[in-house]
Image (cartoon, grey):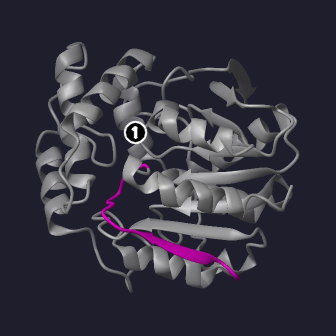
């Protein structure tokens, strides 16, 4: 679905970038979560934003998709480097200030981008997010759901990496079908329990993700090993970009209270809970709500 695919050089890496729609339209920069790649932003979702008059930019972060990868288990960068990558990308594409939408780890990048580079962020949208450094700054918020904690324990026993898009341990990364199976099973515990798990759809996407990846082992491992840097929850009140927080009502990774807390700490932020949604990249049943909301959020600023 690449309208315009290109490579953008950042400090120490080359990023695979896709632009969809008219470059003259307001730009929406999509920042994916850990273990994911640009394909995890569904083509149909992107098309809807484009139809609404947005130029959509989706890209592979370091160790994702067709971007530069690093030795498995030893990523030579940290979360703040991903923030600088996003700022460099906005500049390299001549966007001035972009409407930024980040999911999970991408939402952490978005928070820091809005704090450290406010001139690059026209509006901010944060999905499946938590305020500040995950696991370090939320003693007042609910922990990971039991079913997901059990999955993490199983993955740890097999020396696997946990998180959205990650497979359980012991995967033979040279076996395409085994990797696809692992991705499917890695997504299952993050999904909402009130809706049937779309195994066929997830499997089709997983096959595309594996075929798109330069190194699927690095993609499925390194993003979970990053140093998050200095805590920033106490800084959230300094975000000036108009902010929208979207959160699944059934998110097992960051229960919905995390999203409410995040919105409460960003001045003027709006919160939207998504029924029938877990820690997932906007399942299709949410698009009729999410897309118009995002178009309205990004309509009057540049």
Q: Quadrant of residue 268?
A: bottom right
The one of 159 and 111 positioned closer to us in this rendering: 111
Quadrant where the N terminus lies? top right
In the image, is residue 277 part of the stretch drawn in magenta?
Answer: yes
Question: Is 152 displayed left or right of 5 in the figure?
Answer: left
Total number of numbered labels? 1
Q: Is residue 9 visible?
A: yes
**Whether residue 24 is situated above or below residue 162 in the rendered picture:** above
Secondary structure under tag 1 reads loop
**Whether residue 146 is situated above or below residue 285 in the rendered picture:** below
- At a point 65% along the width and 27% down the height, the residue shown is 17
Quadrant where the C terminus lies? bottom right
* Residue hosting label 1: 35
| Boundaries of the magenta span | 267-281
The one of 279 and 159 positioned closer to us in this rendering: 279
Q: Quadrant of residue 211?
A: top left
Expressed as whole percent of the image width and height from the top left, the position of residue 38 reads: 52, 33
**Whether residue 267 is situated above or below residue 117 in the rendered picture:** below
Expressed as whole percent of the image width and height from the top left, the position of residue 276 reads: 30, 63
Q: Is residue 109 visible?
A: no
- At a point 33% along the width and 40% down the height, the residue shown is 165
- At a point 73% along the width and 72% down the height, the residue shown is 239
Question: Is 286 displayed left or right of 30 in the figure?
Answer: left
How packed mark 1 is, by other alpha carbons closer than 10 Å (few <14, some 14-19, many 20 or more), is: many
Q: Looking at the magenta stretch, what is its main secondary structure?
A: loop
In the image, is residue 212 part of the stretch drawn in magenta?
Answer: no
Expressed as whole percent of the image width and height from the top left, the position of residue 70 reads: 48, 25
Expressed as whole percent of the image width and height from the top left, the position of residue 89 reads: 75, 36
């Amino acid at each position: 679905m690449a309208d315009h695919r290109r490579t953008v050089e950042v400090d120490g890496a080359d990023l695979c970038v896709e632009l969809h729609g008219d470059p003259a339209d307001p730009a929406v920069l999509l920042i994916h979560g850990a273990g994911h790649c640009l394909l995890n932003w569904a083509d149909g979702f992107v098309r809807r934003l484009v139809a609404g008059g947005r130029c959509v930019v989706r890209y592979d972060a370091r160790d994702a998709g067709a971007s530069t990868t690093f030795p498995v288990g030893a990523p030579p960068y940290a979360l703040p480097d991903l923030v600088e990558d996003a700022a460099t990308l906005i500049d390299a594409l001549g966007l001035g200030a972009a409407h930024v939408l980040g999911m999970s780890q991408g939402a952490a990048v978005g928070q820091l981008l809005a704090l450290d580079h406010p001139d690059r962020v026209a509006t901010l949208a944060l999905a499946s997010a938590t305020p500040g450094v995950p696991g370090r700054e939320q003693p007042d918020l609910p922990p990971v759901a039991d079913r997901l904690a059990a999955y993490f324990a199983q993955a740890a026993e097999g020396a696997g990496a946990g998180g959205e898009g990650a497979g359980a341990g012991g995967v033979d990364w040279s076996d395409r079908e085994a990797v696809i199976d692992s991705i499917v099973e890695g997504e299952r515990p993050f999904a909402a329990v009130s809706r049937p798990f779309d195994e066929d759809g997830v499997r089709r996407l997983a096959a595309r993700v594996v075929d798109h990846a330069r190194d699927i082992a690095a993609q499925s491992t390194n993003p979970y090993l990053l140093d998050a840097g200095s805590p920033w929850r106490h800084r959230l009140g300094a975000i000036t970009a108009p902010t929208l927080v979207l959160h699944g009502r059934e998110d097992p990774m960051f229960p919905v209270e995390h999203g409410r807390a995040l919105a409460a700490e960003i001045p003027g932020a709006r919160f939207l809970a998504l029924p029938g949604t877990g820690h997932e990249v906007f399942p299709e049943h949410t698009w009729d709500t999410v897309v118009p909301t995002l178009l309205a959020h990004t309509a009057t600023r540049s």
